Image: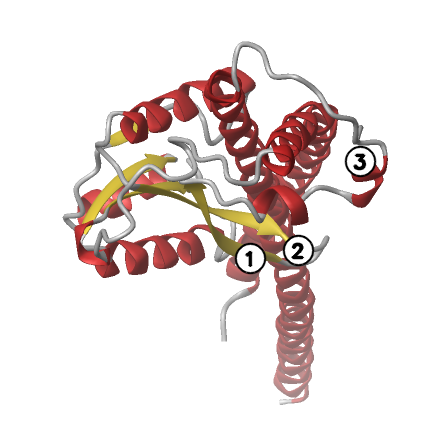
Amino acid sequence: MAGAIEIKNRIKSIQDTMKITRAMYMISSNKLQKAKTSLQATEPFFYGIQMQIARLLRHIPEFEHLYFDNRPKDLQETEKRQGFLVVTADKGLAGAYNHNVLKAAEEMFRKSSNPTMYVIGQLGYHYFDAHNIPIEEEFHYTAQNPTMHRARTIADRLVDAYHNEQLDEIYMIYTRMVNGMAEEVVIEKLLPLERKDFTTDIPKEMLAGMPQEQFNYYPSPEKLLDRMVPNYITGFVYGALIESYSCEQNARMSAMKAATDNATDMLSQLSVEYNRVRQASITQEITEVVGGAKALRRKKND
């Protein structure tokens, strides 16, 4: 059994660790609230863009465009050049958050015949580098600070690669929050766009206020989509970055809470053990005193 001093040192070490886990929990909670506020502030603008694209497609059902149909119909799956934008974190201590998204990304990469990897987050970069998976580009300073500027930079890079026929399909692999307690890894196709995405993903309350009148296009539907689609992709990327950032903070909060709870249990067990050791030590001291007193009495009697 460990001595009293050793147990006291372990108790102090665990108490110091609990201060860190509690502080990290509070920091992640604050970051999570800020991220949700940022997302809510920008959602109306990008839903507006989505609704305008939906109006264009509704009024011209036979319309074809580069961003909707960029490649020949008979292109084989093995011939498609697929790009994957993977969103991970810069830091650990977030439970299974990074592991889940990296597992899904690696699986998609292995299945693809002509993959190209784009990475957000230091953990993703180091993981793919260690597993000899080539990385086309890493977007620094994004995972911990999602901004509209960073989202636009990423979207422009991907749209240019698609527009110049360097890529036939682009997917984004990120983590979306299901509820306050759980998140899931999702794989969304960014390009080419599909018409059904502009009729099912718009909130009903926004569709209710969507104008239904006929209108003229100036200068042309093609030119309008040339400007609107990159903005739509930017909005999607920004929303996904915020979602991933929120999931990271939520996962870190759960991990820190679990760590704090485990530390509390350990402190309780160590306190019991310390009391037992201390009690045994006191009992031993009393026994030694009593034994010494008896020895002295025997010596006097003798």
- Measured from the top left, where is residue 59 in percent x and y? 64, 33
The reply to whether the C-beta atoms of the residues labelled 2 and 1 are less than 8 Å apart is yes
Q: Quadrant of residue 262?
A: bottom right
Figure quadrant of the C terminus:
bottom right
Q: Is residue 180 left or right of residue 108?
A: right
Which class describes the residues within 10 Å of circle 3: few (<14), some (14-19), or many (20+)?
few
Residue 260 higher or lower than 48, as above or below: below
Q: Amino acid at mark 1?
A: Glu
Residue 206's label in the rendered image is: 3
Q: Is residue 241 above or below residue 10?
A: above
Q: Position of residue 146 (x, y in %)?
A: 53, 26
Foreground tag (2 vs 3): 3
Q: Position of residue 130 (x, y in %)?
A: 19, 47
Q: Which residue is mark 1?
A: 184
285 left or right, relative to 228: right
From mark 2 to mark 1, how far is it between C-alphas? 7 Å
Q: Quadrant of the rendered structure where residue 159 is?
A: top left
Of callouts 1 and 3, which one flags the residue occurring earlier in the amino acid sequence?
1
Q: Position of residue 275 (x, y in %)?
A: 69, 69
Residue at figure coordinates x 59%, y 35% from the top left = 57
Residue 221 in sight in this render: yes
The residue at the point 47 percent across, 23 percent down is 230
Q: In this figure, which residue is indicated by the disc labeled 2?
A: 178
Element at badge 2? loop
What residue type is disc 2 on? Val
Residue lying furthest top: 219
Marks 1 and 3 sit apart, C-alpha to C-alpha, by 26 Å
Q: CA distance from mark 2 to mark 3?
A: 21 Å
**Mark closer to the observer (1, 3):** 3
